[in-house]
Amino acid sequence: MKIIGCGNLERGDDAAGILVARRLREWGMDARETTSLFDAWDVGDDVVLVDAMSSGRKTGTIAVWEGTEFSRPLQLRASTHDFGLAEAIGLARALDRTPIRLRVYGIEGRRFGIGSALSPEVAKAVEAVSLRIATEAGVQPLRTV
Amino acid sequence: VDTLARVEGEGALLIKMRGDQVTDVKLRIYEPPRFFEALLRGRHCSEAADITARICGICPVAYQMSAVQAMERALGITIDPAVRQLRRLFYCGEWIESHTLHVFMLHAPDFLGYPDVIAMARDHRAIVEQALRIKKIGNRIVALLGGREIHPVSAAIGGFYRVPAKKELRELMDDLKWALDSALESVRFLATLPFPSFEHDYNFVALSHPEEYPFNEGRLISSKGLDIDPSQYEEHFLEQHVEYSNALHSTLRGRGSYLVGPMARFGLNFAKLPAVAQQAAREARLPVPCRNPFQSIVVRAVEIVFACDEALRIIEDYSAPEAPRVGAADHAGVGHAITEAPRGSLYHRYELDGRGLIQTAKIVPPTSQNQKQIEEDLREFAPQIASAPIAEATLRCEQAVRNYDPCISCATHFLKLEIVRG
């Protein structure tokens, strides 16, 4: 299982994916942080992506998609700096580079401004998602002090 | 256009027309100001490279290079020639990465009539796959020299914190040779795209070096006679606040707007390109200088050819410097530097006190320098699309804005097009 956390630590709740990756690394799992999703997986991989989302759901809500049902975004919001998760999956699909299994965890955020603090609901969701992924992978989470 | 897609940052474009007459064009950048210059005050000079690298996720190398070189000028440090070559290689990596992403993922779909690269990939799979692979090589160079791909950390005043061994660099060579051939192929492909007919007599501004295609050093020259040392920049260029934008507009005193970036470098420095890149440009029938901004997509591809070729040359000739960096005692001073970011000239100036603490900092990114020129070009271009349906007009305007690969985050700091028809 390859876990990839996306996001920006300096933009409040956008840090959620990165924080999950960090927590899972503390538990000894192969979890990375990346902004270059094109190169982040190979076709044979079992991939779990974690990212913050802004979908109008309640802050801290956790959503899970299996890769095949992750719909294409209506509008691409790519830029030279920021080719989003949905676009990367869309492109991978167009090029037959989707991994053998792909799950996407979304954590609903509220604050995405530069320098804003992590919302307590998101902090809780980060722990919950980390536990879920670890449990699924059969990894015993270490007790954090 | 309400929100400009496929450009970096948040912005909007307003075009007011009466019949087919354009009455107003405003490129509004509403991404909030970021206050990096103020943030730097009171910090030690050694911190500037890592702080300014955070201005941009795609061109951090440019920010780091302008910052360390300005500090070296302030402190009177002369770097090892091998370090200078490594810095050029670092820049090659960033140009390959940034240009490849822009040319193929963001700009090419406009010319080929696709809404995005995902749709384009279904019909032009080989091109998209090739581009992803070329880009990855750029990432590898940046990661090797910078310590990591995003926000590299190895650049330091006087050199690098760590320099690679020749063996590590040689491992890049096979991939770089492949990338060079692929880049040449892509120039031929891009030359066949349909380019709207549009030209402007630009005042091009770029660095110029006696022997090299410019990255990191040289005098700042223009196609209309400017020839200055980077330390004279503020005597000749003016930054002005305009009410509707959070990015400052730059002008050349007494001459108005000007253009920095690939077209400017290519027009002013064609003779310094290696033979392989010159040949590619000729085969693509690119005029020198090239004055059609839509052809900038081909010019960028020629610069990818150059960057691959230059990277190979540097690696072949490389022998590690005696020390990764040379140190110097903190002292008061003022230092200026201009380097060529993928999008154009990037100016930094720092004033240091006796403890090496930054008293004042000034950073002028390429997009704010081009902003006025972008507006002027759109004013001239808009009548061509005046009678088109709004969706088509929006697409054409977005394509036109992407000619300049604007980095709105850097300039302040997504583009919205609004066409008001009177």
Image: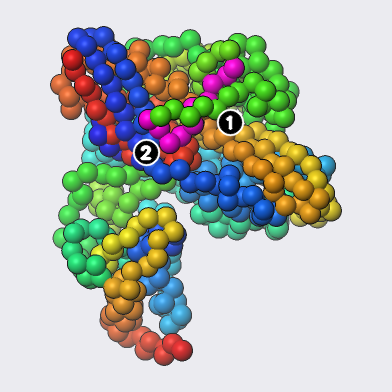
* Mark 2: few/some/many CA within 10 Å (<14, 14-19, 20+): many
**Residue at 79%, 54% in the rendered image:** B355
Reply above or below: B422 against B57: above
**Residue at 43%, 62% in the rendered image:** A9
Q: Quadrant of residue B313?
A: top right
Q: Residue furthest front?
A: B243
Image coordinates of residue A128 in percent, x first then y, are 29, 79
Q: Secondary structure at mark 1?
A: strand
In the picture, measured across the screen, residue B359 lies left or right of residue A145, that is right
* Mark 1: few/some/many CA within 10 Å (<14, 14-19, 20+): many
Q: Is residue B198 visible?
A: yes
Image coordinates of residue A27 in percent, x first then y, are 43, 82
**Residue at 21%, 21% in the rendered image:** B420
Front-lying residue, B82 or B71: B71
Tell me which chain the residue with mark 1 is part of. Answer: B
Tell me which chain the residue with mark 2 is part of. Answer: B
Residue tagged 2: B30
Residue tagged 1: B345
